[in-house]
Amino acid sequence: MFERFRSGRSQGPDERALKALISACERLIGEAGESVGLGIARQILKSYSALSLDLKNQFFKAIAKGFNPDPSQVEQAARRYAQSQDPKDLIKMVANAQPPRQELFRRLNRVPEGCAALVKMRESLLQSLAKDRSLKAVDSDLEHLLASWFNPGFLRLEQISWESPAGLLEQIIQHEAVHEIDGWADLRRRLEPDRRLFAFFHPALPKEPLIFVEVALLHEMPNSIAPLLDRKSRPEPSTKPYKVAAFYSISNCQPGLKGVHLGNFLIKQVAEALQSEFPDIRQFCTLSPIPGFVRWLLSNEPFSRDVLTEKVWLRLEDRRRQVLARAQSLSAASDFARLAQDEGLRLSIVSLGAAFLGHVSSSPSQADPVARFHLHNGARLERINDQADLSVKGLKQSLGLMVNYLYDLPSIEENHDAFLRGDIARSKLVADLINR
């Protein structure tokens, strides 16, 4: 194992540090004593954290090559089980097929700070993976384990308020990924009585939010983001009961947990908490961006004829040609603004947005990531809002369009199952935008 690092040639301090780290990983896997193993695991995590980004990449390459299962043992175990169908042989086959690096990660996780360190390790691994696909198996192993360790049953839902610790509030400002929080005054407005902010926490990272969602309590479904973000606005009056809870921002705080599904459980738990606090709320919806719309539009990928009638397909393609004729010269923010507010093109833009979400979002390769997230969670595509986000970011990514996804709690499972079959739950309003 790791012959390159065991050659007799002269090695520099970096290579010696990497060789020592890899040797420690081998010892940890072979160590039977738990107390000794904890000491080795602590040293591995300490040594790993001191590596440069380049050496971390070499470390990942080493465990990608050196901690794989033995192919001959896997083959023999599989043949034995295929012949016997004995549960004992099944257990042996699974054990032989499991990469030793999974056991390495498990033993590193036994250290009190190990879980947090492994989340940070995967963050670095994802950066290396973007340039080196040979690390995919290592990432798959670590993601699999993190998904188990960060199972929703281990998570704690917590409401964040203005009275929360300052350090936590600073993290909220730092990690907001959808609508930037411009300082303390902006954050305070988002924590007023007609707003809610909830986050998931894990025992291994008790002071660090994993993911959080911002909610506006309203009397009707919102169609524009500006009023929700206006720090000078007054809180919605509570003299009459709130009818709508609008999720307007969801932000992940831990890049190392990418692919570990937390957002769907967060939304459902928050909906339950809000329904308990405000029994009159009847609608749980989002006001969401469409970050993939302009990118898809400019790609000029044709709509599939399989899901549209010939008449509708021709109309949509004609509308796309109209918009593209104006979109080819887009560069400055003012160009996007003029296009988004062109009265002659607004119907075409909204119709194309509805068709993009309603027919392309079931395709993993072309789908808008936000749409795929909500539709996979069982939401319904409810309404497309024109000129809903006229910020520079909103214009450049979606020509100002935003969308309301509706979380109808009794229909969530049915909508989720339909989405897995390639069917997107949509309202009549959205269907009419596509077909007219």
Image (cartoon, grey):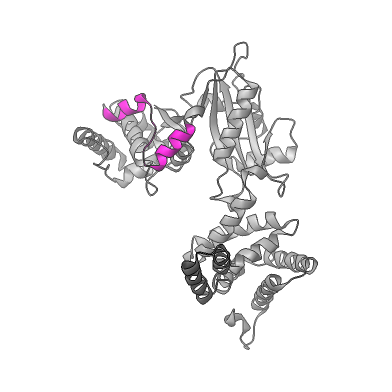
The residue lying furthest to the top in this view is 239
User: Camera-side residue: 365 or 189?
Assistant: 365
Q: Is residue 74 above or below residue 255?
A: below
> Position of 342 compared to 55: left or right?
left
Name the quarter where the C terminus is drawn: top left
Q: Is residue 432 above or below residue 150?
A: above
Asked whether 432 falls inside the magenta stretch, the response is yes
User: Camera-side residue: 38 or 80?
Assistant: 80
Q: Give the magenta part as a residue range.
A: 412-435
Name the quarter where the N terminus is drawn: bottom right
User: Camera-side residue: 72 or 43?
Assistant: 72
Q: Quadrant of residue 325?
A: top left
Magenta-colored segment: predominant secondary structure: helix
Q: Is residue 48 above or below residue 267?
A: below
The location of residue 35, given as percent across then percent down, is: 80, 66
Residue 190 at least partly seen: no
Q: Quadrant of residue 8?
A: bottom right
The location of residue 67, given as percent across then percent down, is: 58, 71
The location of residue 229, given as percent across then percent down, is: 56, 28
Q: Residue at x 59, y 32 (%)?
A: 214
Asked whether 45 falls inside the magenta stretch, the response is no
The residue lying furthest to the right in this view is 35
Q: Residue at x 54, y 58 (%)?
A: 126
User: Camera-side residue: 260 or 7?
Assistant: 260
Q: Is residue 123 above or below residue 389?
A: below
> Position of 353 compared to 149: left or right?
left
Residue 393 at least partly seen: yes
